[in-house]
Image (cartoon, rainbow, N blue to C red):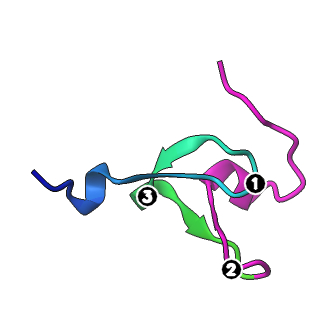
Amino acid sequence: MEKTYEELETICANCSISFRIKDMKVNKETNNLVCVNCFSNPNCKIFKIR
């Protein structure tokens, strides 16, 4: 069975953490999908959440 749009996951281009695609934002400068955290704080250094 195919996944619906709400179930698709991708990796943030900045922090490399997997998120659902519906929770991602497009960075206008790089045209990459980034998570909400990286979108809000473009210079963040988070690489892993435990």
The quarter of the picture where the C terminus appears is top right
Residue 3 image position (x, y, % from top left): 21, 54
User: What type is the residue that disc 2 sits on?
Assistant: Asn
Q: Residues within 10 Å of mark 2 (few under 14, many from 20)?
A: few
The residue indicated by pointer 1 is 14
The residue indicated by pointer 2 is 31
Q: Is residue 46 left or right of residue 49?
A: right
Residue positioned most to the top? 50
Residue drawn 67% across the image and 26% down it = 49
User: What type is the residue that disc 3 sits on?
Assistant: Ile
The magenta-colored residue range is 29-50
Q: Using the numbered discs, state the Cα–Cα distance from disc 3 to disc 1 in whole angstroms.
A: 14 Å
**Quarter-wise, where is residue 47 in the image?**
top right
Residue drawn 40% across the image and 60% down it = 22
**Quarter-wise, where is residue 17 in the image?**
top right
Q: Is residue 12 left or right of residue 21?
A: right
Residue 42 image position (x, y, % from top left): 83, 59
